[in-house]
Image (cartoon, coloured by chain):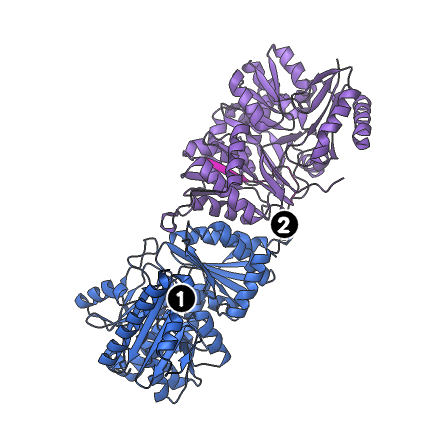
Amino acid sequence: MRQLKIGTSGIRGVVGDALTPELAVNFACAFGAYCAGGAVVIGRDTRRSSVMLRSAVLSALISSGCEVIDLGVCTTPAVSFAIRHTGAAGGISVTGSHNDARWNALKFIGPDGALLNAANTEELLDIYHAGAFLRVGWSELRRFRLRTDLIADYVEHVAEALACDAVRSRGLRVAVDYCNGAAIEAGQRLLDRMGCEIIPLNDDPSVEFAHPPAPSRTNMRQLAALMRSVPADIGVAINADGDRIGFVLPGGVPLSEEYSLPLAANEALATRSGPVVTNLSTSRMVERVAERHGRTCVRTTVGEGHVMDLALTNGAAVAGEGNGGVAVLPHAATFDALLTLGVVLRTMAARDCTFADLCADIPAMHMHKGEVAVPPDQVYRVLDVFREQYADVEADLTDGVRLEWPDAWLHVRASNTEPLLRVIAEADVAERADTLFDEAMALARRAAMAHGVR
Amino acid sequence: MRQALALKIGVSGVRGIVGDALTPQLVTTFGAAFGTYAGAGPILVGTDTRPSRDMVRHAVMAGLMSVGCIPVDLGIVPVPVLQSHIRRSGAFGGICVTASHNPIEWNALKFFGADGILLRPHEAAELTDLYHQGVFPRIGGTAVAEPRHDDSAIARHREAVLRHIDMDAIRSAGIHVAVDCCNGAAHAATPAFLEQLGCRVTAIYVDPDEPFPHNPEPVPENMTALGQAVLESGADIGFIQDADADRLAIADETGVPLGEESTLAIVVRHVLKRDPGPVVVNVSTSRMLDDICREAGCPLHRTRVGEINVVSRMAEVGARIGGEGNGGVIAPAINPCRDSFVAMAYVLEAMAQEAKSISALRAAIPHYAFIKERIEVSPREVPELLRALRALWGEADLDYTDGIKAIWADRWIQARASNTEPIVRLIAEAPCEADARQMLDAARAVLSRG
């Protein structure tokens, strides 16, 4: 099967397979037309294929009459900032984000700095499918501008949002695993600005990823090992384009990436009004934090495009997903790992506490995640089996089947990226989580077998 | 007449109008096709100064990278500089982003093999086959190589050319040169080249970010500014290059254009004096070359129009000098392509060694009236029109090397379809202007009836 996914997270595929420069040219031409030939900001991560896709995107945007503002290697939130800062019509971040090095993607960002929402993505796709591109003559071509200086402006923006001078006196020691990704320059600048002592890991952008870039516990083993021998106040892993973050406790215990959102929310809700927005698969920890601050927690379809669209619409204080992607509003319109890190460091300084103290303040839950191979054409039949099995519980059908009890919840949904059914169960106590998860996995496997064999 | 398409894919490369047929999609896929053809290795990429250069360059590089090539970006460079740098740097091939003498709305890709020579017709056919098959050996994302940059090409080419030239003679002659670089690819290379030869240089139109001040074809109607610069600065000679600096035309010390056919004639006469041997030119080149070769006792070979045809025949017959009458001088021992720098060096060497003014050098060669016209014709009408001309010219010697050429004792006329534009070129040469004009008008009457 060819690996290509088109949706609110942009176009994503395996380079050399479905993701070719021609495809990138066509989508960037569609985006140039979507932006009506206005200014477009571009940035890229450190993947080797990003240089190729950047050239394809650059050529396509220039041919559409766009003035291209190229930030070079930078994070997706830096592209988002630069769009708002320069008043550009949109932006493209060339990054495979959390996917492994074989993958790459184009993330399309609107004038508000947020990923295109579902409706806007549909418009972009209509332009793409119709081939309704702008092709301007030679006299309307604009020279592109290299603006790597905007990365410093982005860091300044984050630093001002955090009022981070208060952190300086704490002199925190921060171990950072950049995964040799795009956040290196901005991360070093921000942490310098916050007076932190940096213990860097995988901070060479010319070297391949040392591990898959998603900030999961498995992928933070190298960072955890480092922290067992080098004392640090906190450890963080940032993915390839700086939109997701994971944390490691001093002494080298990696936390689930589900912690990133509640940690940031616990602080953000203390200073800004508005609800929390997250997706249907994210841990209830953030609900408990929201309740403590007297706020609601609104859940929507999985995917940053959906979550941020709702967050910007309903004036959320903070938004994010259980994968480590967090946006602290109004400072960010995309998930932003460095802003999230800054919020956590500021909290440690303001409360004069350790990172372990902050984590202890988050009500612990017990979560299991699993997956069952299901052919795409069978997924909806398998989901129906869940609806029938749990007919006594009111199901949320926004994205697959989500079932909720006072002490637990279960979410079963089709993966956006692979022919898989994802199963997530969470409960207040471990035994309940174990039972619920085992039951659901067994049911999913039985249903898959029944429907998979014809 | 049917609207002619603004796209030509042929032996001269891929050429089209920006915003019309020359899209980033087309260019990216040709980049991938050429990378497939040349193999996964370093490929030199250079551009002229057209405003579409970045758009085309990045599309080419993306296509090259996708099949495992390493683009080596030379930036803005003259075509002959890029060609000579291919062999020197061990690259697998090269692509120049330039529409040469075409107006500014055009751009093009010229493809060169590992020998630095334009793809031969059968090689170009293989490339277009690869393009049309559309199946490329794409590499995985982790194997993509970042483009390299190489700023050394212009200086290395200058050294290579000047090794073959009597620099001392030119230096001691202290020649004052006015040059019009057309804000083109040679904007920096040419003044540096002339200064290295000890010339006093008056350079106009040397800003690569400004549009072409006139059409880049180095023909008399585009040489008004140069003529003025020669007169105002009191220069001994005026040079004008096209946008990619493969062709050269000359103005004399009074600012008068000598006609682009004079460049090759002056150079060949000079080279044969020292180094007699066979000469190769294309079939459209002035009969001045016949006179010069006869006088020197050297055989003259004529080929189809197109640099690659001339270069190939030169290799076959062992010619040391040759080229195309439109200002393209080829000296394979120095650089196996049309090279305006080689042409400038030889012209200055002739002035210095013979201690003659440029008008005196020109006067030593017989003069003919030489007229070129272009007639817009749909390519599908061309065969019918050529047959009609054959009837018109029936009493002459007919040569079918390229289109149809009718030769009489003291004059000739030729009609051929352009390789680069949807036009038919009519070229007539006769002892005087009226005779040439008469032949042209008769032919034009036949063409417009079609």
Q: Quadrant of the C terminus of chain A?
A: bottom left
**Could you give the CA–CA distance between mark 2 and mark 1, rounded to whole angstroms?**
45 Å
What is chain B's hue in the picture? purple
Q: Which residue is mark 2?
A: B19
| Image disc number at residue B397 | none
The chain letter under disc 1 is A
Q: Residues within 10 Å of mark 1 (few under 14, many from 20)?
A: many
Magenta segment range?
A: B93-104
Considering every residue shown, the one lying at the far top of the view is: B297
The percent coordinates of residue B384 (x first, y second) are: 74, 28
Q: In the rendered image, is residue B256 in sight?
A: no
**Residue at x-position 21% and y-position 67%:** A227
**Residue at x-position 76% and y-position 39%:** B1
Image quarter of residue A201 = bottom left
Q: Could you tell whether B355 is left or right of B136 in the image?
A: right
Q: Nearer the viewer, residue B348 or B245?
A: B245
Image quarter of residue B7 = top right
Considering every residue shown, the one lying at the far front of the view is: A454
* Residue type, label 1: Val
**Which SS class for mark 2?**
loop
Q: In the rendered image, is residue A370 in sight?
A: yes
Q: Could you tell whether B296 is left or right of A261 in the image?
A: right
Image quarter of residue A230 = bottom left
Q: Which residue is mark 1?
A: A379
In the image, residue B351 above or below residue B293: below
What is chain A's hue in the picture? blue
In the image, residue B12 above or below residue B17: above
Labels 2, 1: one chain: no
